[in-house]
Amino acid sequence: MFLLMLKLVIPRFFPGLLKHIVFIGFAVFLLAFTLVGISAGYYLALKIRKIPYISHNDLSNTELDSQRGKQFLIVKCATCHIVKDILSNNTPEEWERIVNRMVKLAAPQITPGEARQIIYFLTTEYSSRTGDPIRRIPPAH
C-alpha cells in the first residue's frame, strides 16, 4: 500500500518526475515483487520440505506437534547447549522440570507455548517411561 501511495504522490508533488513515471512504476513493481518473494520464500521452502513453520505468535492454543517441538529445541536450546548433550532419557516429570527451569533462565526467548512443544517432543521421543505424555504437560499460562 505504501508503494502504491508513493507512486500516486510523486506526479502530484513532483511534476518534474512525470516523464520518469513509467520507470518509477516499474521500479515500485519490482520492489514489491522482491519483498513478497523474500518473505514468502522461507515459508514455501519449509512447506516443500515438510518442516513446520515456526512463527512468533502465541502457541498456547496450538496442537502439540513433535516436529514443531524438535524445531523449537534446535532453534531455542542450541543457542546455549549442544543438542546431542541435551538428549538423554528422562521421565516426563524430569523433562517438564528441566524445560521449565530453562524457560525461567532464558526468559523471554522461550515462551510457554514453545516450552509445551519442546516438552511434548522430549517426552514422546526421549522419555524413559511409556505413557501418555500429553497428560503431564502443564497448560500454558
Image: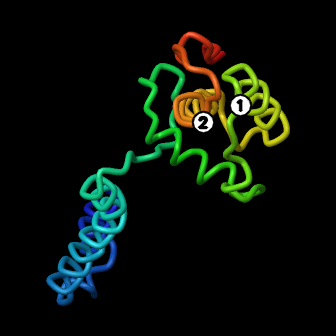
Q: Residue at x 36, y 51 (%)?
A: 51
Residue 58 is at least partly visible in this image? no
Residue 131 in percent (x, y) is at 54, 15
Residue on which disc 2 sits: 126
Q: Which residue is drawn at 51% across and 35% down?
A: 57
Q: Which residue is drawn at 24% across and 65% down?
A: 8
Kind of residue at badge 1: Asn
Residue on which disc 1 sits: 90
Kind of residue at badge 2: Tyr
Residue 63 position (above or below residue 29): above
Q: What element carries label 2?
A: loop
Q: How is the image coloured?
A: rainbow
Q: How far apart are marks 1 and 2 (CA)?
A: 7 Å
Name the residue nearer the viewer: 70 or 109: 70
Q: Relative to residue 41, is residue 99 drawn left or right?
A: right
Label 1 crowd bin: few (<14), some (14–19), many (20+), radius 10 Å = some
- Residue most toward the top? 135
Residue 121 in percent (x, y) is at 54, 34
Name the residue nearer the viewer: 110 or 132: 132
Residue 22 position (above or below residue 105): below
Q: In which quarter of the image is residue 85?
A: bottom right
Q: Quadrant of residue 12?
A: bottom left
| Quadrant of image for the N terminus | bottom left
Q: Relative to residue 60, is residue 51 drawn left or right?
A: left
- Residue most toward the left? 22
Q: Is mark 1 on a helix, strand or loop?
A: loop
Name the residue nearer the viewer: 119 or 75: 119
Residue 130 position (above or below residue 5): above
